[in-house]
Image: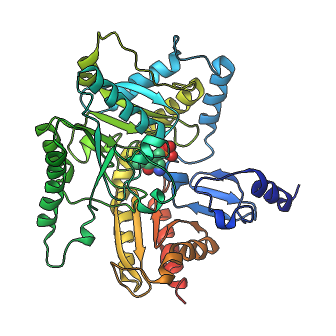
Amino acid sequence: MDNTELRAWDNGHFVHPWEGMAAVGQNDRTFVETASGIHIVNDKGERLIDGPGGMWCTQIGYGRTEMADAMAEQARQLAYFSPFNNTNSIATRFARELAKRAPGDLNHVFFTTGGSTAVDSALRFIQFRNNLMGHPDKKIVISRQKAYHGSTYLAASVSGKERDRLWLDKADDLAHFLPNVNPLYRAEGQSVADFLDEKIADLENAILTFGADRVAAFIAEPILASGGVIVPPEGYHKRCLEICRRHDVLYISDEVVTAFGRLGHWFASKDVFGIQPDIITCAKGMTSGYAPMGAAIISDRLIADIAGNDATFSNGYTYSGHPVCAAAGLTSMEIIEREGILEHVRQVAPVFQERLHDLRRIGIVTDTRGMGLMGCVQCSLDGNKTSLLEGDYEIGARIDAECQKRGLLVRPIINMCVMSPPLIISEDQIHQMFDVLGDGIRASVI
Ligand code: PMP
């Protein structure tokens, strides 16, 4: 069958994530047919470096026979059984390995089907705990502008990307959003240190305004990922945690993007940012994209708070702890360890960051931000950092198109392009990637 017909079927039957209604049924999407290592191959036979790493998730790279074998073997042995009253050994083993690597007393793994359900489950667990502890009014979640925590109702309700909130309902009373923590947007003449003080005060003031007896949790991505790779000023998370502790507010670290090596460690909360959260949510790189899975990893303390109570945590999924996904997760973890992929990331990240920041020499580049193997380049046709020209809304897509012609896929987000390649990318491939990105940016304004 040729792809004209397939494309018609795609337009006719497949509703894609973030489906734009203006072009619904008339899209010209590329089919990606095969992939290996850091490369994907599309239906035109073009081989491209996967700059976004799927969706921040293809840690060990594509086409690993070992992964396919482990998943097939598990499917042959036990593809599925209900996780409600029973368990399966592979998910149990994976839970133990996750708990060993999660910081401090984060020892209790609630398996989910992805990142949104991990965040949803973390929020529901906190509601559950607070109800059982006699604090039914302690429910408000403090989040931040530009945060993305997922697409289920609760996770979307604590997500702060303005545009995503335009057309859908949300639990309005649940969340409060703190202003953008991107120091690029600090007031003229304000130092980064003063900006940081202001952001910390924003958190404490919000808690005091609502009253600590009404605020349940603060949720934060260590680095705001799809909000545009926003790296808060140094010390931000530590100080936020101190404020949370002072007011008995729980800290959820949403590591859906930053865990499993993206910043060179299993989890970034402790090893990169020096904090011990109450719950970590994770997904994506957990299986390197080979199977859908996520988790909310909960502390001993939170479990102990309500252990022995007569209540049931009525939250869970048919596919919680799915054996084939657990096999993918365990095998990916083994590969990361055996091949020293965390150490590799720590070694090549400075090259990645240097090449990323070099892009600032190009006139339309107004900012570059990143850490580890995460990066974002922000552009504006007139070089203005704060306001967007009409043409700026298309610039990300134009850069992506120019890069694709040259063998690189990037992830355009309005006037930004985001990069998070598979963690196995070599130093040479990093140079190759940024050479193309630079050319693509320059070509997109001619
Ligand atoms: N949290 C963060 C920080 C994310 O980046 C994402 C996905 N981009 C999610 C949660 C939701 O994960 P999923 O798409 O697997 O539901």
Q: Is residue 252 left or right of residue 199?
A: right
Query: Which of the 4 quarters of the picture holds residue 129?
Result: top left
Residue 436 position, x and y percent, is 53, 74
Query: Which of the 4 quarters of the picture holds residue 364?
Result: bottom left
Seen in the picture, residue 139 relative to 383 is either above or below; the reply is above
Asked if one can make out residue 254 in the rendered structure from this viewpoint, the answer is: yes
Residue 198 position, x and y percent, is 14, 61
Q: Which residue is painted at 51% across and 24% down in the image? A: 321
Residue 58 position, x and y percent, is 52, 48
Residue 310 position, x and y percent, is 34, 9
Quadrant where the image shows the C terminus? bottom right
Seen in the picture, residue 403 relative to 266 is either above or below; the reply is below
Query: Which of the 4 quarters of the picture holds residue 399?
Result: bottom right
Q: Which residue is painted at 13% across and 43% down in the image? A: 242
Seen in the picture, residue 297 relative to 426 is either above or below; the reply is above
Q: Is residue 126 left or right of residue 283?
A: left
Q: Which residue is painted at 52% across and 20% down in the image? A: 90
Asked if one can make out residue 423 in the rendered structure from this viewpoint, the answer is: no
